[in-house]
């Protein structure tokens, strides 16, 4: 968040974040859901608002892309219900409605960008989740960025990505 009084031209990231938040906020219902267990941020991570991973998976980019966007495959690897509209602008709710959002950009077998939020965040607060798939022989290099989330959420989100996505996906693709 820029708090200075000098106006800055919008960056691509700011523009995408604003567009994603507007799309998601305009069309998602506001229902009260149970919250995920919070993990307090360490002092070193309290101000962090981005997560970056580069991980290899024993799957093709197509298999990975489908696992994220197909609600049956998502539920199979995560062990939790999911409703996912796999179209650009399509809404999703995952982990029994604890995570909601919209697909902002979909490039088949290459990239997924989502406006993404846990339902315990204040209404209208969204972050961007960016999955980039790079083929590496029979494997996929995932370049992942989660940006724009509220300060103080880093450790909770980082732990969640590890335990609810990366570990289950490695088992799912094994």
Image (cartoon, rainbow, N blue to C red):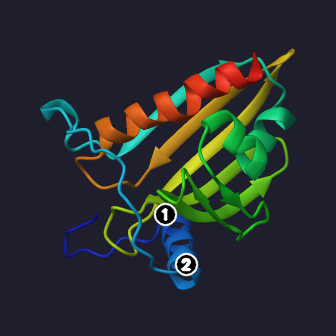
Query: Which marked residue is nearer to the observer: mark 1 or mark 2?
Result: 2
Classify residue 42 as left or right of residue 166: left
Q: Which mark is residue 11?
A: 1
CA distance separating discs 1 and 2: 26 Å
Residue 36 horizontal/vertical position (percent): 36, 49
- At a point 78% along the width and 60% down the height, the residue shown is 86
- In the image, is residue 118 above or below residue 52? below
Q: Is residue 116 shown to the viewer in this render?
A: no
Q: Specify the quadrant of the image occupied by residue 104.
A: bottom right
Report crowding for label 1: few under 14, some 14 to 19, many 20 or more residues within 10 A (C-alpha): few
**From this viewpoint, which residue is outermost toward the left?**
43
Residue toward you, 48 or 70: 70
Q: In which quarter of the image is the C terminus?
A: top right
Q: Residues within 10 Å of mark 2 (few under 14, many from 20)?
A: some
- In the image, which disc is placed on residue 28? 2
Numbered tag placed on residue 76 in the rendering? none
Q: What element carries label 2?
A: loop
């Amino acid at each position: 968040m820029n708090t200075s009084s000098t106006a800055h031209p919008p960056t691509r990231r700011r523009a995408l974040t604003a567009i994603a938040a507007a799309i998601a906020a305009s069309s998602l219902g506001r229902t009260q859901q149970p919250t995920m267990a919070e993990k307090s941020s360490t002092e070193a991570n309290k101000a962090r608002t981005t997560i970056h991973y580069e991980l290899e998976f024993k799957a093709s980019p197509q298999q990975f892309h489908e696992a994220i966007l197909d609600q049956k495959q998502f539920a199979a690897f995560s062990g939790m219900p999911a409703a996912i509209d796999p179209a650009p602008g399509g809404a999703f709710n995952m982990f029994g409605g604890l995570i909601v959002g919209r697909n902002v950009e979909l490039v088949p077998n290459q990239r997924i960008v989502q406006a993404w939020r846990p339902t315990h965040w204040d209404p209208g607060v969204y972050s961007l989740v960016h999955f980039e798939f790079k083929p590496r022989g029979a494997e996929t290099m995932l370049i992942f960025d989660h940006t724009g989330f509220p300060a103080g959420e880093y450790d909770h989100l980082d732990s969640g990505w590890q335990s609810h996505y990366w570990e289950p996906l490695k088992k799912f693709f094994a």
